[in-house]
Image: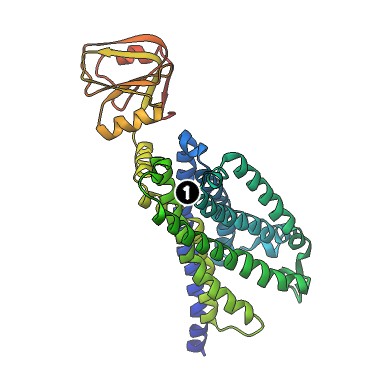
Amino acid sequence: MSSNTSVVLRPEILSQYLSLSLGFIILLSGLIGNILIIIIFISYDKYQTNVCSYYMLMKTIFNLLFLLIGLITRILAYGFYFDLTLTNRFWCKCRSSLLDIISFYSLTCLCLQSIDIYFSTSQFILIRQRSNMKNARYLLIIFIIFWIIHEIPSFIYQDLISYNEIHSCQKLNFIYEYYHSYGATLFLSICLPIMIIIYFLIRIFQQLKSLNIREENFLSKFSKQIMKMSLVDISIVLLFQFPFGIVTAYFTTTKTLMKSSEQKLIQTFFNLYVYGLYACSFYCYYGASKQFRRHVHLLSKEYGCISNVTYISNDTQIIQSNFSLQQCICYQWLKNYSGLNYNSQNTTCILFQNFTQNYQLKTTNQTKFCFTDIPMSQTSNKSTTSNSSIGTV
């Protein structure tokens, strides 16, 4: 009797361990990655003015929300057997609707990324002009309103019920439950995004092959990097959504049948596996883009800037014109210079190979003295009387 019980309980224990181990791995990697993406995209102006990167930023924000709301509560429910949907009626009604809105919106941003790349790589100017920040903002506002309206019936019909002191959170309307299982889950969140992404990926690669060298010049180096990041990000969705869609279709069509413990374990694995879609964007960007890797490395370096101060010495100097402050800092980091003077009035920067002990810090307007290593002498007296900032550039 005890041996049979242990055999039955083993998949349930594995399911608990799986929820804890795999759940925490996805959660931690996703939180770190998404937060780093948000910091980098907000810190550099170019990411905020590019339409595709704007979609990527919004998707990242909603991916972070999905992990915080969805995965944490799932770990609590299946790993620690603390399920708020079985004790709190309001949370029972809200959780499913809220996660659907966030998930649909994130997938919408992913689809918009693929559409925007198709527009941006077009040979026709009129099509390329459709890719602009004004249209992007309008589309994002329209879709968030649409998904909120779409989930109102879910909030109404989802409720906490009790039968023989057993609580369950489920949809009370059979017709809407059928629509949600097949229409919303299988079609809107799995099949439709996959079809849109595959279609536009094919069209994008067709357009890229047809571009000649002269036609590629309208794409800036930064735009090409963003496209590369986005294409990898879009492609990776197939890795998660295809197997999850197959498993979901099976369990949805056979939900009236009794499931074995092994089948429930498989279902638990894929319900956790799909959360990887909301956690892996940072690692896709890091692997796909050299420029993104540079920005990540810059975050890990200690860096300081003193406003309205100019460093004057006889050190080796390199002058760069028409650079933003971020470009100057990236150039300094790549070429391993010790510091720079930046003049925001004429957008020039003077880079220093090494610091010497014979120098002056002169007070000037609209300038910044930035450095990775503080000069050896005289710095402490000057820096205490100047407006200084660390890591704010």
Going by the image, does 89 lie left or right of 54?
A: right
**Res 181 quadrant in image:** bottom right
**Res 96 quadrant in image:** bottom right
Quadrant into which the C terminus falls: top left
Please tell me whether residue 304 is drawn above or below residue 3 in the rendered image.
above
Along the line of sight, which residue is nearer the eye, 126 or 363? Answer: 126
Residue 263, image x and y in percent?
Answer: 53, 80
Question: Is residue 167 something one can see in this rendering?
Answer: no
Seen at 36% across and 52% down, the residue is 287
Residue type for callout 1: Gln
Going by the image, does 117 lie left or right of 84?
A: left
Going by the image, does 333 lie left or right of 388?
A: left
Residue 194, image x and y in percent?
Answer: 54, 65
Q: How many marks?
A: 1
Seen at 58% across and 54% down, the residue is 106
Question: Is residue 195 something one can see in this rendering?
Answer: yes
Going by the image, does 217 lie left or right of 245?
A: left
Seen at 48% across and 79% down, the residue is 10
Q: Secondary structure at mark 1?
A: loop
Along the line of sight, which residue is nearer the eye, 279 or 331? Answer: 331
Residue 151, image x and y in percent?
Answer: 72, 59
Please tell me whether residue 185 is drawn above or below residue 382 in the rendered image.
below
- Identify the coloring: rainbow
Residue 39, image x and y in percent?
Answer: 47, 39
Q: What residue did someone put label 1 on? A: 123
Along the line of sight, which residue is nearer the eye, 26 or 61? Answer: 61
Please tell me whether residue 367 is drawn above or below residue 123 in the rendered image.
above
Badge 1: how crowded within 10 Å, few (<14), some, or many (20+)?
Answer: some
